[in-house]
Image (tube, rainbow, N blue to C red):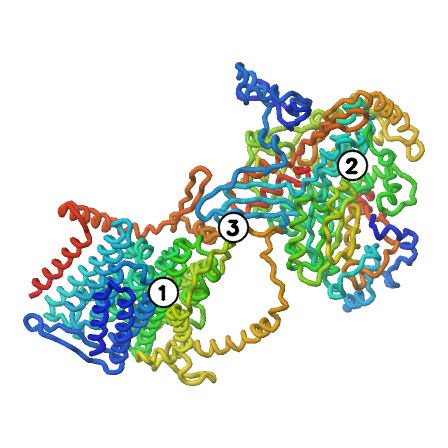
Amino acid sequence: MSSSDATGQRVRRRRLLGVIQADGDGYNLVQEGDGMSLEPAAASEGGARGESPTASVNEERAAIGPRELLADREGPIGEAPVHGAGVFDFRYGPFAGGFPEAGVFHLSTYGERILSCRIDSSYKHRGIEASMAGCLPDEGLRWAEAVCGNFAFAHSLAYCRAVEGALGIEVTGTDRRLRLIGLEMERIYNHLLVIARLAQAAAQKVLDAHLSALFEEALRLNRLFAGSRLLAGVNRIGGVSPMIAAGGAWAQRGPADGRAADTRPPDGPRALERLAGGVEVLRTRFERLYETSLSNRNYLDRLHLIGVAGAERALATGLTGPSLRAASDPTDLRNAEELLPGFAPITKAEGDSLARMEVRAEEILQSCDIVRSQIASLLEGGSTGSGAGASDRGLPSPAAGAREGRSEVRAKALQAKALRAAEGGSGIGAAESPSGTIAWWVDLSEGRIRRAYASTPSLFGFRAFAEVIASHIFTDFPFALESFGLSFADAAR
Amino acid sequence: MTRSMRSESSDERRGSDPSKPRGKSPTRRPPIWWPLFGLGRQLTERRHGYARAGSLKAIDSLFRRSLFVYPIDVGNSNALNIELAALRTPQYNVHRFGIFFTDTPRHADLLLVLGRPTPKSSLPLAETIDQLPHPFGILHLYEPFPPATHLDEVELPNLVGTVEGTPSAEEILGFLLATKGGPGGRWSASADSSPREAPESNAERKGERK
Amino acid sequence: MIWVVGAFALFCLGALVARWRIAAYAFASAGSLAAAAAGLSGLAAPAQALQMPFVGRLWIGIGLDRLSGTFLLISSVVWLMLSLSSIRSGGRQRVVTAVAYNVAIAGMVIVLTALDAVTLLVGWEIMTIFVFLALFERSRSERPPILFLAFGELSTLLLVLAFALRFALYHTISLRASDGGVAFFALASLGMIVKMDIVPFHAWMRRAYEQLPGNLAGVASVGVTLAGVYGLERVASIGGASGWWPLLLLLLGAASAFWGALQAAGSDGLRLLPAYSTVESNGLILSAVALSLIAAQEGGSQLAYLASFAAAAALTLAIAHALAKTLLFLSIGEAGDALGTDTLRETKSVWTNVGPVPALGIAIGGLSLAAFPPLIGYVGEWMLLETTFQAYRFTAFAARFITSFAGVLIALAIGLTAFAMVKLIGYTVLGRERRLLPKPATSSWLSAPQISLAGLILLCGVGIPALLPLFGFGRLFSGLLGVPKPLLLVSGIPLFGVLSPTLFAAIMIVLSAIPILSWLARRRRIRAVDAWNGGIEINQAESFTSPAYTQILASILKNVYRTREHREGSARSVETTDFVADLTRPIRRAVDSLAGATSRLFMNGRIAAYVLYIVIILVIAFVVAAV
């Protein structure tokens, strides 16, 4: 989280993740180091507004981020349209054949060159945060998952962490490990899809076919792990779904979720072993594909120097995740993860589409390793994770054991919930989604959600994309867009 | 999962005998007229039994051989989009069934509406329907959540089916085959491919071998 | 001969009654008809003359022969159409425009019928000066008209030098004698091609065509250049067209065609695009004339046939250019005036907002220039390419090489012209304007010139077996493979290539009849919807613009176009420049300083009048010197 400036002095960078209007006051959601906090707007803006005489101090305190974008998140993202002789608005969307989601790219152009880009994500605006007001925290979880289907796990995890923080609920080491596995599984399939789309845009049909096949394999592994191809319904407040904790029990949820019932007995360790095996094969196959693709100049030239978002621009636009790491900034929430000792984020220097692709590709390999090592830790039953506490008893025994083991945790959590529910409270939770930091702020009172706020990576991603696509030509559009791994659903909420 | 499908019990679906490969050992080289034979016996579809939506009605017998699908997202959480992307992967090979995806409604036989329309996407949705050539069908897939209210305001003409839930790619393929009419759609699913089997993918089997 | 005199008199009469514009243009129309009759009589009974003694043993006068008749006939069609349409649109024009129009055409009559150099030069000067006067009246700045005059006088100067040289050597000023010499031919042909807007002498027309009224733009583009082509052929008939000079002319012509087409493709001006297309057409005509001279000077029956074929190509191209460009200027003038626009990107939906006739005029004229079969432009360009394909028949290596190279340039020019015309037709005729304007009231008979020009373009293309024999090219037609005798145009002996536009048109009609009939039968059952663009109707700001259409060319050829991207605040634009036109900047600068000095000398008033005096004095001085 911290980087050294020119003088070698360590500066803790403060990043602006959200602007929240609550009770007539403005608050900023600020990330500082590994922690996140909500502070009055003035505190993190001082330098920028020039209100304080000690500007230099405040400048350091000022949080970096696209303030005007966060102030009006429903408005258009990007720059004002350009005028001039022959300049027109090339509208791509809302139902654009090439992009799967509903949303509009307004590209000002006089022919081949894109002069400015303005993005309208409002076609996907479902008003999720507003709808959550008055919900029970468990209902809110479904809303949080519905923000973005392919980041469902990261969203629900960040939301759960926020609620757990607000209610002071402890999560067992096992559940934390299972959550880590889910997060990495989500990363794997999303990254595979991004790289497959890049290959498709570059007309690399064979590579695309192989990567797509791996993507489908990853979805099937998800189902093996969680019973849901997109990892929905895994997270619960206070832990993960007991079925998943028992492993293999996903199948029992079948009829309730429309899937056919399965009669085999729950088979936790077996399922996790099979998952580890599947991930291993996937890793081997992907590594070979990736190395082969790196020898293809035709493919790499399409990505090289496209959509360059260097470190400064990336920070100013609020980019996080692989896009930021591709600009040699090692920011990653997993750095602070206790269960991942020695985690080293993958970074590249160039900040172009190629660097973003490389970061994603190497993260797939890294995630596979994390999944396997976490499964190994679970199967050993040992407490390999530091600070995991006494509750980390490894994987509970299948079937009955699971329910027993969990019931006491559950009871404790409910007790805490009941205690806190009366006075309420608020919490911030975050998770490193495949495309960057997802943060949820939840304000509870009397056991119900009063307010919720989600900071989503795609919003910043679209802002950055709108900036970097200017002065490129139309052909570069998909290579720049897909490399950010963005989603309108995520941006519009 | 499906409004109209819910009545169908899983027992019924298993009632039909899972078709086994007919007599011939799989290693034997198929005869040259195999494609015709396969089409006549409808082997490809029967072995996998993708179709589980016997109640979806077919658009028109015109599209039995090929169906061009134009998918649009009107506000789903992206889950349906991802499953549709998965449907285009080599594992499903949808072209084999004569199913193709187009990028414009002008070439489409079936409009696949994904999600509940948000207030802003209702208008472009109506325009898209206006652009469809006759005859056409509309298949509406939407997630149970969020329970937005706009659904009732949108009237979809020529609706061949409405599915609530987040179906997997495999299930979407079943819906498409049922919509297409013709051989693929007439079959109810065989129990041969329960969801349990599906995740046993190549990746996994190889993994076990290690 | 009576017809020539009659035509001349009628045009002069038209100038006299210019206060009543309709009468002026009615006289001009009558004069055009008389000129057409004169042209026909010249074709039917060549060698008529009307002479008078000049000084010494020299005679001056006017006369008709086959060449004069040919060009008089073609020109008269153009004059007639321009005059008829001016009856309708000329009411808003100034008196001086009507005067200039009539007198300039009278000057052209003199040029086309002159028997001797002096008469030719007098006609030449009249033509130049009166176009200049009209331009001067219309122009907001002095520079474009002065520039036009400068290039006009450069042409005159070269011609004066050429005829003076010839007089010194051979003591004759007759245009019917055949004793030229290489130096004479070089100077005289240079003088003629300056008038034809050949690159790099085209700098004047950029601004001039934009500011001339529609009918005078037609006269300047079509009439003056036709006079130039006539002059070139006349000079060639005098002799001296040998050695390297025709090859150089061929290169100039091909380069001009290429450059004009390239600039037409890159321009966004409603009148600038056809103006550059004129440069291209004239380049093609010059190439054809030069090829005919090259083939003729080598001798042999094969090459004699080729020379005749190339001459026919030049004539066909001249007719195509005359008809199509007149139609284009009339239609574009009408559309531009009605919509009040002067760029392509603003001029859309001509069919709905102006009327079907100008839309059809732009479409037919543009298609002919883009070599769309079976229109006349297609026939002419096919003939020219067929001629360059037969470069192997030449014996000299230089002739073969340069002809092949010119063929490449010409082919590129034809392709680029198609690009330019697709842009022109696509935006003005097919482009959809989303805001509808009140439709101007038009009556159909007033559109008769445009309709008849469009019809002529089609008829001349389909009826080429009837058209070319009229001008003495009957032996180019034959029959083969079941095609009846006069319908097949043969490009070489022994057989090289054949074309039958007539048959082509017949087959096209038959083949397209079936889909058209079935469309007509089912028309009521067709459901019309808006263009698909992502589910939302396209608005005005989202329409594709014509500069955007050109952008791909402008950015790929950015070194040729000298493409510059301008950036001012939130406004951006792209500009392409014609740097060849800038090569003649020294001439322009000299003209500027001369004009400045002149106005300082006389301190006041109307520069035009003074320049006119100076030129007249110049001519008188020459005549006196000749004595």
Chain of the residue under label 2: A
- The numbered dot on residue A142 is 2
Label 1 CA crowd tier, 10 Å (few <14, some 14–19, many 20+) = many
> In this rendering, do the residues under marks 2 and 3 share a single chain?
no
| Residue type, mark 1 in image | Lys
Query: Distance from label 2 to label 1 (Cα)?
Result: 70 Å
The vertical placement of B30 against A411, above or below, is below
Task: List the residue tagged with mark 1.
Answer: C325
Which is nearer the N-term, disc 3 or disc 1?
Answer: 1
Report helix, strand or loop for mark 1: helix
View extreme (top): residue: A54
Label 3 CA crowd tier, 10 Å (few <14, some 14–19, many 20+) = few
Chain of the residue under label 3: C
Task: List the residue tagged with mark 3.
Answer: C540
- Pointer 2 and pointer 3: residues touching (CB < 8 Å)? no
- Res B180 seen here: yes
- Res C235 seen here: no
| Residue type, mark 3 in image | Gln
**Quadrant location of the C terminus of chain A in the rendered image:** top right
From the viewer's perspective, tell me whether residue B111 is left or right of residue C65.
Answer: right
Q: Which residue is more in the foreground, C363 or B107?
A: C363
In the image, which is nearer the foreground, mark 3 or mark 1?
A: 3
Q: Residue at x 18, y 64 (%)?
A: C183
| Residue type, mark 2 in image | Arg
Chain of the residue under label 1: C
In the rendered image, residue A29, in percent from the top left (x then y), is placed at: 66, 25
The vertical placement of A170 against C228, above or below, is above
Report helix, strand or loop for mark 3: helix
Query: Distance from label 3 to label 1 (Cα)?
Result: 31 Å
In the rendered image, residue A262, in percent from the top left (x then y), is placed at: 90, 45
